[in-house]
Image (cartoon, grey):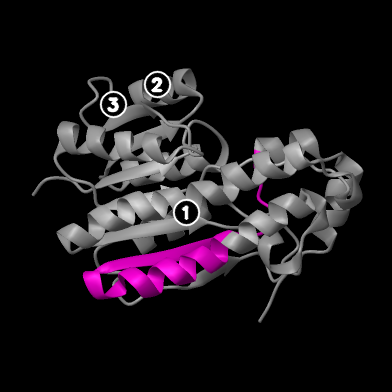
Amino acid sequence: MSKRVVLVTGAARGLGETVARRFHHAGYKVALGDFAFDAAQALARELSSDGSSAYAIRLDVTSKADFEAARDTLLDRWGAIDALVNNAGTSKVVPVMEITAEQFDQVIDVNLRSVLFGCQVFGQHFAAQGAGRIVNIASLAGQNGGSATGAHYAAAKGGAITLTKVFARDLAAHGVTVNAISPGPLDLPIVHESVPADRLEKVIAGIPVGRLGSASYIADVAVLLASADAYFANGACWDVNGGLFMR
């Protein structure tokens, strides 16, 4: 049997890189979609020197045309697409009263517009083939208004959770499931680099389990939700936050 094919957006670094590596380890052919094309190419070469199971795609997630081009490229290259992980995101912490229109638009475009376009383009393709999996990476900030990440980021991630439910309901009858994963604070280099040590200690102290989350576990959940067997998980927001948000 041929390997399953997944496109991971924002795959060149951070959580996206971890997710891409985990899918590849699980036996998938992995398309690394990222605007940082050089970094995506380097990761693709590391995972698959001959390009047979990892391939970099220049992808601007704010462009529907780029998603369509990525779909067509994968169909030409591997003949199939089975799953999409909408992971790409950006944020810059700015007090809510100081967020400019430009800052708001940029964060909404990368974190929310991308989910809309990805779900539209790949949801339509999956529906036509009668099967497919979409996993949207949301955030705890989208559930509790997390001011630490910026109100525009929180609004975008809350919107991503809502879009997950809308597309899940719309596509379910066509064999397509759509789920979201909502991580809390993760143990990633970017977190340690951007958050002062004393502040990070306070963050960790406020997490009921007493530690940061694991990016590799988020990746495990993504692989689970993208599997063919995960047909009964649909329209859900999978909370992985150490107990910071319970409902």
How many angstroms separate mark 1 from mark 2 (CA)? 26 Å
Question: Is 112 in the magenta?
Answer: no
Kindly identify the amino acid type of the residue bearing the numbered disc 2. Answer: Gln
Kindly identify the amino acid type of the residue bearing the numbered disc 1. Answer: Leu
Tell which tag, 3 or 1, sits nearer the viewer: 1
| Circle 2 Cα neighbour tier, 10 Å, few/some/many (<14 / 14–19 / ≥20) | many
Element class at badge 1: helix
Q: Is residue 42 or residue 80 the one in the foreground?
A: 80
In this rendering, does residue 234 appear at all?
no
Magenta region? 160-188
Q: Position of residue 112 (x, y in %)?
A: 57, 51
Q: Position of residue 49 (x, y in %)?
A: 27, 20
| Circle 1 Cα neighbour tier, 10 Å, few/some/many (<14 / 14–19 / ≥20) | many
How many angstroms separate mark 3 from mark 1 (CA)? 30 Å
Q: Is residue 213 or residue 237 the one in the foreground?
A: 237
Residue marked by disc 2: 41
Query: Dividing the picture into quarters, in which one does residue 174 lie?
Result: bottom left
Residue marked by disc 1: 116
